[in-house]
Image (cartoon, helix red, strand yellow):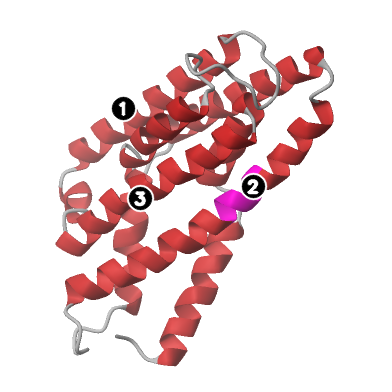
Amino acid sequence: MPSLDVLLAFVVTTALFAFIPGPAMLYAAARTMAGGRKAGFMAVLGIHLGSYAHIFAAAAGLSVLFHAVPVAYMLVKLAGALYLVWLGISLFRSKDTHAGEVSPGKAGSSGKAFVQSITVEVLNPKTAIFFMAFLPQFVDSAALFPVWAQFAILGLLVNVIFTFADIVSVLLAGMIVARLKQSGTARKLVQRAGGTILVGLGAHLALQRS
């Protein structure tokens, strides 16, 4: 494994990336605003588990395919973008419910948030590119551990740190929901805001050049 100094630099750099508001934090916050804190936490868990697909891909070198085959990258990106837009519209149109008490059959429920979040993360090629571009800078080909194992260990650390940042975003969004839970109109506005954020994330992903 890399030296202690390199690992420290890795952790600090990862933390800086993690706490800069990005798509994952906005997505987790949007699910919290739409379905309550429980839905937000389940969304974070889904994102966390979905990220392991990209960690495995980076360890196996599969993420190189996105660089070698631009069409594959574009197709996955558009699929993820369309899915985000569809989720946003579903949340925007779902009926008003008490904050944190969304019925299991609704789009904002915690169970659906979990499953949908795994899909969103797996279909996010940006995550694959991030792991493939970021992790090699801290991998030592001469170390005792094989390269694939270093990718897996460093990827796990990245995922844990990013998950912690996503949890913070859920807690902050949950505070907003808690303050507005007594107002049906405010709840509906917050829910629609969450759906709008998801649509915006989907549009942003689709329109990005790389």
Percent coordinates x, y for residue 65 in the rendering: 16, 50
For image coordinates 34% across by 45% down, the residue present is 50
For image coordinates 66% across by 30% down, the residue present is 33
Badge 2 vs badge 3, beta-carbon distance below 8 Å: no
Q: Is residue 178 left or right of residue 209?
A: right
The residue carrying mark 3 is: 51
In depth, the one of 200 and 166 nearer the eye is: 166
Q: Is residue 111 left or right of residue 61?
A: right
Hey, what amino acid is under mark 3?
A: Ser
Can residue 21 be seen by looking at this rendering? no
Among numbered discs 3 and 1, the one appearing first in the sequence: 3
Q: Is residue 41 left or right of residue 123?
A: right
Can residue 42 be seen by looking at this rendering? yes
Distance, label 2 to label 3, CA atoms, is 18 Å
Q: Secondary structure at mark 1?
A: helix
**Residue 108, above or below 43:** above
Q: Quadrant of the C terminus?
A: top left
The residue carrying mark 1 is: 79
Q: Which residues are magenta?
A: 165-170
Camera-side mark, 1 or 2: 2
Percent coordinates x, y for residue 17 in the rendering: 53, 62
Hey, what amino acid is under mark 1?
A: Ala
For image coordinates 44% across by 25% down, the residue present is 112
The residue carrying mark 2 is: 169
Among numbered discs 1 and 2, the one appearing first in the sequence: 1
